[in-house]
């Protein structure tokens, strides 16, 4: 592009597109796969690099659990790819996050790991198992994960990511700089600090959306950003059995367009039993388990929007896919 003019011919766009699809055809470029085929299918066989996925939900719907599982199981699922992970953990200290990971690794409740049960404390054998697990996971060559714990402004966020990508960049055989594919997670968007120029959280979220778009264009990053939903989803009218209001909508995302318009995929999460909903939505899906999660794929830039059902195994800090529940049909009587 001529630096004196802000436009360029479409020729480069065609060249880049052909190079990209050829590399994918040859298996040289692949997406970042998640543990769930339903999610991968909603994307491009996973999350494409240079993309933004926003996961929104009210407290208790398992947002952080899902993010942790995507990271924890990602290296195994995406073998053959060179990947780094940078986590912005604004809501939870790193220690708590790792105890949750231990819970999943041992298939035992968090409270057991913390010896919170008076008659069922963590055994020495289980402690040794977790010690050996941690020794394996801190192998920075096999599991390169880094964590930022302190909340920062959007401007500082840009600086940290730019420094990180430059720090781990490598040179190819021709001496050209190559950035490493990196998964960047944010838990969660509303916990960024406001800059002096930002009058409200909404201003901050708009700046965050623009920053994410800038960064995903510049670097091969798959962003996974957790977000809250507005309190309106809690009102009684939306939590009556069999109502359309049960569904999570585009307008429910905190900050609305601030993140939605920048995202490539937006998932709105609900846990119906938490609101005592037995028949979910106008189709009246039968919810007979408090661990059922409903994921509304509100935006799939390169896929299809849909609604899918999952089950949370909280004691193992995992989520698994489940079949679509049956629908309630009222029996007619003569």
Image (cartoon, helix red, strand yellow):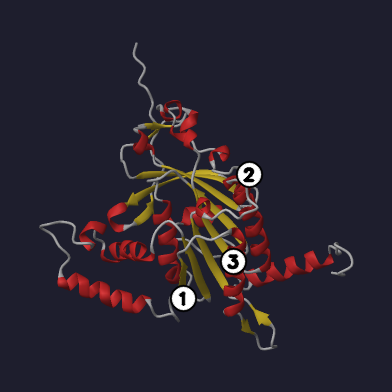
**Viewer-side residue, 38 vs 247:** 247
Q: Residues within 10 Å of mark 1 (few under 14, many from 20)?
A: some
Q: Are marks 2 and 3 in contact (CB under 8 Å)?
A: no
Q: Are marks 3 and 1 in contact (CB under 8 Å)?
A: no
- The residue depicted at 58 percent of the width and 75 percent of the height is 180
Q: Horizontal placement of 268 versus 299: left or right?
A: left
* Spatial CA span between label 1 and label 2: 33 Å
Badge number at residue 144: 1
- The residue depicted at 43 percent of the width and 75 percent of the height is 143
Badge number at residue 128: none
Rendered-image quadrant of the C terminus:
top left
Q: Are marks 1 and 2 in contact (CB under 8 Å)?
A: no
Query: In the displayed image of the protein, which residue is found farthest to the right?
Result: 4
Instruction: Tell me if I can see residue 43 in this picture.
Output: no
**Viewer-side residue, 178 vs 188:** 188
Query: In the displayed image of the protein, which residue is found farthest to the left?
Result: 119
Query: Relative to residue 83, is residue 262 depicted above or below?
Result: above
Query: Relative to residue 7, is residue 322 depicted above or below?
Result: above
Which of the 4 image quadrants contains residue 47?
A: bottom right
Badge number at residue 257: 2
Q: Earlier in the sequence, mark 2 or mark 3?
A: 3
- Nearest to viewer (mark 2 / mark 3): 2
- The residue depicted at 59 percent of the width and 62 percent of the height is 48
- Secondary element at tag 2: helix
Badge number at residue 221: 3
Which of the 4 image quadrants contains residue 167?
A: bottom right
* Spatial CA span between label 2 and label 3: 22 Å
Q: Residues within 10 Å of mark 3 (few under 14, many from 20)?
A: many
Q: Position of residue 292 (x, y in %)?
A: 36, 43
Q: Earlier in the sequence, mark 1 or mark 2?
A: 1
Instruction: Tell me if I can see residue 151 in this picture.
Output: yes
Q: Position of residue 11 (x, y in %)?
A: 84, 66
């Amino acid at each position: 592009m001529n630096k004196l003019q802000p436009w360029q011919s479409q020729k480069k766009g065609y060249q880049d597109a052909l190079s990209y699809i050829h590399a994918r055809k040859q298996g040289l470029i692949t997406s970042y796969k998640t543990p769930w085929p339903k999610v991968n299918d909603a994307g491009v066989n996973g999350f494409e690099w240079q993309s933004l996925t926003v996961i929104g939900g009210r407290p208790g719907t398992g947002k952080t659990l899902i993010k942790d599982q995507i990271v924890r199981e990602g290296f195994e699922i995406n073998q053959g790819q060179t990947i780094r992970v940078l986590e912005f953990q604004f809501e939870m200290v790193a220690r708590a996050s790792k105890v949750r990971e231990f819970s999943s690794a041992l298939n035992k409740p968090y409270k057991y790991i913390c010896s919170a049960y008076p008659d069922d404390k963590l055994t020495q054998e289980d402690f040794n198992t977790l010690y050996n697990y941690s020794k394996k996971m801190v192998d920075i060559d096999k599991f390169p994960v880094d964590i930022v714990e302190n909340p920062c402004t959007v401007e500082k966020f840009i600086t940290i990511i730019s420094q990180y990508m430059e720090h781990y960049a490598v040179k190819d055989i021709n001496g050209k700089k190559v950035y490493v594919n990196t998964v960047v997670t944010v838990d969660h968007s509303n916990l960024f600090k406001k800059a002096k120029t930002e009058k409200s959280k909404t201003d901050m979220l708009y700046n965050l959306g623009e920053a994410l778009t800038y960064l995903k264009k510049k670097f091969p990053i798959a962003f996974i950003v957790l977000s809250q939903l507005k309190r309106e989803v809690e009102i009684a009218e939306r939590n009556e059995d069999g109502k359309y209001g049960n569904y999570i909508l585009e307008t429910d995302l905190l900050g609305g367009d601030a993140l939605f318009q920048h995202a490539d995929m937006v998932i709105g999460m609900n846990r119906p039993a938490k609101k005592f909903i037995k028949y979910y939505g106008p189709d009246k899906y039968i919810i007979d388990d408090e661990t059922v999660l409903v994921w509304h794929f509100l935006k799939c830039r390169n896929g299809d929007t849909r609604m899918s059902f999952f089950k949370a195994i909280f004691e193992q800090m995992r989520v698994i896919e489940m079949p679509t529940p049956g629908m309630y049909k009222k029996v007619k009587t003569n």
